[in-house]
Image: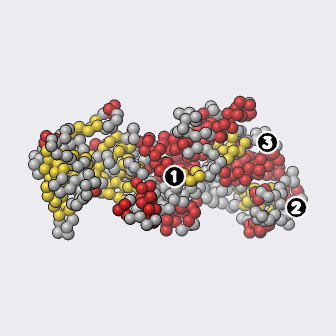
């Protein structure tokens, strides 16, 4: 589809690139980068940035660098670097070269020395709290540090001694000398180097001073020849500083920074720091918990990269912040899965149904299509026997006319099979239903009974010819649409129904299921095999999502009840 079609809205960044190419700017080249800090796993918000940087470059025959912003060794880890690479590849993108900000530490240090010798940077000996106090506020200008007028010679000496490791953490910092009265607080002599006597995962103990992000980012872009530096609106106020460093240092390549609105998705958090807190507190089962908005979690849950890319294009690229409904993402996933997911039957909450007039030793092979709309996907055989399982939700002892499933004395059709009638209900001493005694009509395979109406169609599996499986059902992790707005006490916001585990029975055909396969459990939703826990022959299935937006219905119901509507009217 083209951008002129309704599915994908206009992309203003694409228009900028097209204009640059037409004018011959950057010799009509397009070079982008994706620069994550390896301090956590990527989430769905990062997917938007990935699709933009990699997708636009590919569209215009350009190239994209993957660059790790590894300037803070206190928070970074090799685990995160490996996970980020895996996520980008899973999304379907390839980088021209992998770079690290640490590759440029020597060049960045030389740039910093150059600024000092130009009188554009100085070593400040104020503490962190004092620097914040001197910086002023959004409504009050800052004040010059008492160390701002140190001589160039003294600043060069102090900075070299910082580099040599003579000082302890926090004793000195290097600051750019710009304007303490600037209305843009980012321009009030920002810190560009600090002392961190911490071993780096790549450079070891080679360095004890590390550059700040604002200084590193623009110069790394320049070194790599980036033409269009794409970032979210959170960096818009930093753009003057981005340009200041490049202009003062008179670099050969001056990239253009372009900001776009970040992705905010309902019932999720878009902060690696906050997501890490969930992991560290054990609120979730790791970064790849299928309830997490991380790409690792979405992949394990069974979402397809095609659906994520489609979603990122559909939400559009603007400068206006918005809060995307979770149903929007789910709709993209459903549209992607519907034509490709093979149909199978799985009973999540089994209730045994004994067909008393069916030969007890007979096993009949019924034929079922793998997809009702695509004959090319073939068919499968479904074993049918005298004892089968149906879902408990498909039987009620008492029900009104709107209930279209099995009731005492009523008939239903078994999917791809016969019509059965419930004759007796078997209960244990506690009054719990343990089985149903039924009869079947042998003349109803593939046709309706004559002279009577069947209530509905339900799914089933053979009791003996089916497999036990653990099935995990997921709902949104948070119970409020915008959890980021509710403070830091995440435990109170967790949806208690975010994960439900069922001891299910599934078709024997699923014995050969692989983690990359997606299935529609008929009448239940879309599922995939859990790639971590399905070991040693165990079958563990994650529900990717239901067949309909049930969560939205629950939310609307709760809202109506809160407005005084009767529950039975909803």
Compared with 537, 170 (above or below) is below
Mark 1 or 3, nearer chain start? 3
Q: Nearer the viewer, mark 1 or mark 3?
A: 1
Q: Nearer the viewer, residue 319 or 297?
A: 319
Q: Is residue 267 left or right of residue 107?
A: left
Q: Provide residue 466's location: percent of width, then percent of height.
A: 24, 48
Q: Provide residue 298's location: percent of width, then percent of height.
A: 47, 50
The residue at 64%/50% (across/down) is 320
User: In whole angstroms, how far apart are the C-alphas of marks 2 and 1?
Assistant: 54 Å
Q: Nearer the viewer, residue 270 or 325?
A: 325
Give the residue pinned by disc 1: 325
Q: Is residue 487 left or right of residue 530?
A: right
Q: Nearer the viewer, mark 3 or mark 2?
A: 3
Q: Provide residue 547's location: percent of width, then percent of height.
A: 38, 48
**Local SS, label 2:** loop
* Residue 392 image-quadrant placement: bottom left
Q: Provide residue 32's location: percent of width, then percent of height.
A: 65, 40
Res. 431 visible in picture: yes
Give the numbered dot on residue 150: 2
Mark 3 or 2, nearer chain start? 2
The residue at 64%/42% (across/down) is 33
The residue at 76%/39% (across/down) is 253
Q: Nearer the viewer, mark 2 or mark 1?
A: 1
Q: Are marks 3 and 2 in contact (CB under 8 Å)?
A: no
Compared with 266, 313 (above or below) is above
The residue at 81%/58% (across/down) is 182
Give the residue pinned by disc 3: 251
The quadrant the C terminus occupies is bottom left
Q: Are marks 1 and 3 in contact (CB under 8 Å)?
A: no
Res. 287 visible in picture: no
Q: Is residue 406 left or right of residue 100?
A: left
* Residue 159 image-quadrant placement: bottom right
């Amino acid at each position: 589809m083209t951008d002129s079609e309704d599915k994908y809205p206009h992309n203003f960044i694409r228009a900028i690139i097209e204009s640059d190419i037409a004018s011959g700017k950057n010799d009509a080249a397009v070079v982008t980068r994706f620069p994550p800090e390896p301090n956590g796993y990527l989430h769905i918000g990062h997917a938007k940035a990935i699709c933009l940087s990699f997708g636009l470059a590919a569209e215009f025959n350009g190239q994209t660098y993957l660059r790790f912003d590894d300037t803070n060794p206190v928070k970074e880890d090799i685990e995160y670097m490996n996970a980020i690479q895996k996520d980008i590849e899973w999304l379907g993108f390839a980088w021209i070269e992998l770079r690290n900000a640490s590759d440029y530490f020597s060049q960045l240090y030389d740039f910093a020395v150059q600024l000092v010798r130009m009188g554009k940077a100085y070593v400040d000996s104020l503490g962190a709290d004092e620097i914040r106090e001197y910086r002023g506020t959004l409504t009050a200008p800052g004040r010059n540090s008492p160390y701002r007028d140190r001589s160039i010679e003294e600043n060069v000496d102090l900075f070299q001694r910082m580099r040599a490791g003579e000082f302890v953490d926090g004793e000195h910092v290097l600051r750019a000398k710009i304007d303490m009265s600037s209305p843009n607080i980012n321009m009030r002599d920002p810190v560009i180097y600090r002392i961190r006597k911490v071993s780096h995962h790549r450079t070891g103990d080679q360095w004890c001073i590390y550059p700040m992000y604002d200084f590193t980012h623009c110069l790394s872009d320049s070194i790599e020849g980036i033409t269009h530096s794409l970032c979210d609106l959170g960096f818009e106020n930093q753009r003057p500083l981005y340009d200041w460093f490049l202009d003062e240092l008179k670099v050969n390549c001056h990239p253009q920074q372009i900001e776009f609105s970040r992705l905010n998705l309902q019932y999720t958090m878009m902060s690696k720091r906050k997501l890490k807190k969930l992991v560290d507190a054990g609120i979730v089962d790791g970064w790849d918990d299928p309830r997490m908005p991380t790409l690792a979690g979405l992949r394990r849950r069974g979402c397809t990269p095609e659906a994520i890319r489609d979603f990122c294009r559909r939400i559009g690229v603007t400068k206006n912040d918005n809060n995307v409904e979770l149903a929007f993402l789910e709709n993209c996933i459903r549209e992607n899965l519907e034509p490709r997911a093979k149909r199978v039957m799985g009973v999540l909450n089994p209730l045994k149904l004994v067909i008393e007039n069916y030969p007890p030793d007979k096993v009949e092979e019924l034929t079922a299509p793998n997809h009702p709309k695509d004959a090319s996907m073939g068919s499968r055989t479904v074993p049918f026997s005298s004892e089968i399982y149906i879902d408990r939700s498909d039987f009620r002892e008492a029900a009104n006319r709107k209930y279209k499933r099995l009731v005492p004395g009523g008939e239903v059709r078994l999917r791809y099979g016969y019509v059965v009638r419930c004759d007796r209900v078997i209960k244990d001493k506690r009054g719990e239903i343990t089985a149903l005694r039924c009869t079947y009509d042998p003349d109803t395979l593939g046709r309706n009974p004559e002279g009577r109406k069947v209530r509905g169609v339900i799914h089933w599996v053979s009791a003996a010819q089916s497999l036990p499986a653990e099935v995990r059902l997921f709902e949104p992790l948070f119970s409020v649409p915008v959890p980021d707005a509710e403070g830091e006490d995440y435990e109170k916001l967790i949806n208690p129904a975010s994960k439900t585990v069922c001891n299910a029975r599934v078709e024997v055909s699923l014995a050969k299921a692989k983690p990359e396969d997606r299935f529609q459990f008929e009448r239940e939703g879309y599922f995939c095999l859990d790639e971590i826990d399905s070991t040693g022959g165990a079958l563990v299935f994650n529900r990717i999502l239901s067949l309909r937006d049930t969560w939205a219905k629950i939310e609307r119901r709760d809202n109506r009840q809160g407005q005084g509507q009767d529950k039975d009217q909803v």
